[in-house]
Image: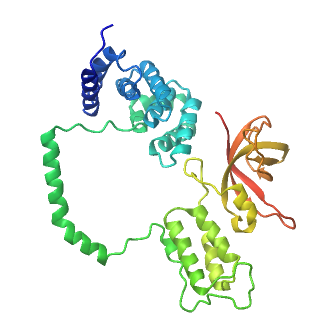
Amino acid sequence: MKSIPAGRKRTALARAARLYRARKFAQVIRVLEPQIPAYRENARYFYFLGMSCLYTGDYGTAITYFRRCTDLDCGHTNARLGLAVVHLRRNETRESLRIWLEILEEDPKNRYARLGLETVRKIAGTEDGDDGIEALFQDRKDLALIPSPGFYLPGWAKWLIAALAVLLVLVPAGFAARQRLLEKPQPQRPEIAAVKIESADVVLDPENRAANMLTEREVRVIFDKIKDLFEAYEDNLARREINRLLLSNAGQNIKNKARSLAPFVRTPTFADFPASFAYQDVMKDPLLYDGCFVRWKGRISNVNISGKRIDFDFLVGYDEQKVLQGIVPSWMEFAAKLEQSFAYEIIGRVAIPSGRPGILLQVLSLHELGL
């Protein structure tokens, strides 16, 4: 077979990229499909083909191209997002969920994977079931689960837009800068911003000889940090800093105000809980993590089902049966089928047992690893 010169290879792929951004998906397929021998090791080539087939509704061909793309580049996130949509179209929901969860483990802020999980959750919570998935694809709302192709603009249009952008930025720049100086941004969580240390508050308790002794300045810094963490929706870190104040020599009125913020801590999900406190850190100072959430992997043993509660031991870090970090007595108050031969990932709330060292764990969510 006669080889295609390198210049032609680049031209064909570049042309397909422009057509893809211009949303001319059928033309992308016509340009690229005859070039398969030349691009058989090019992940980007198979990505354009897979996405173009998805947009034209040819899901059967799209899955072939997406699989080849991910074979060549296993970290190609956008191709994996496309693959998850194709599996959803084939009613292979479990495989779609697996892909989205893997993506979120690598990139917790990926909005397409998070939207995919939320979409499936909403459909599963209705009586429609498979009809809900069918309607999703009939209305082409599935396209919201993959990145947009972008836009293709000719050179003159880019220059025109750049010139207009400069004008739009320069003209109101002075006014906008002045407004930013005059106006303070409104807090996203005003109920938290309203809790303040007042001038009459006793900041330190001179009679308290806590293990965590702080200065007045340190108490104020930690209190402000708690509010900043809540404002940034880092609720779990905020809970730890609340504990830091409660375990210190801060005054009782300061502790009461810190304690009043604890109910605002949101319970995380697998979709919005990217980072967890390490088991070793929690065990170094369990009281500091009382009420905090953790996301750990491991296995279970000694399962005991009684009434509306399931008790078991969670073997932290033993998911691959190599290293056992520790055994934590755990319980959950929802129904689930637990297999001691399976590995699990859990989200749990740390609790402190009465009268003995260590921690307990209230499991709030779990899923089997590898699904």
Q: How is the image coloured?
A: rainbow
Q: Quadrant of the C terminus?
A: top right
Residue lying farthest to the top in this orientation = 1
Q: Which quadrant of the view contains residue 4?
A: top left
Residue 166 percent location from the top left of the image: 17, 57
- Which quarter of the image is occupied by the N terminus? top left
Expressed as whole percent of the image width and height from the top left, the position of residue 153 reads 19, 38
Please say whether residue 138 is visible from this viewpoint: yes
**Which residue is painted at 26% across and 38% down in the image?**
151
Asked if residue 310 can be seen in this view, the reply is no
Q: Is residue 130 left or right of residue 62?
A: right
Between 19 and 43, the one nearer to me in the picture: 43
Q: Position of residue 149 (x, y in %)?
A: 32, 35
Whether residue 276 is situated above or below residue 335 in the rendered picture: below
Q: Position of residue 169 (x, y in %)?
A: 20, 61
Q: Is residue 320 above or below residue 360?
A: above
Q: Residue at x 87, y 65 (%)?
A: 356
Along the viewing direction, whichever of 306 and 292 lies nearer the viewer: 292
Task: Please state the total of marks drawn on the protein image.
Answer: 0
Left or right: where 241 falls relative to 332 = left
Vertical comparison of 367 with 136: above or below: below
Residue at point 66% right, 73% down?
Answer: 244
Is 206 left, or right, of 192 in this rendering?
A: right
Please give the name of the residue rendered at 43% of the width and 37% of the height, measured from the top-left corner: 145
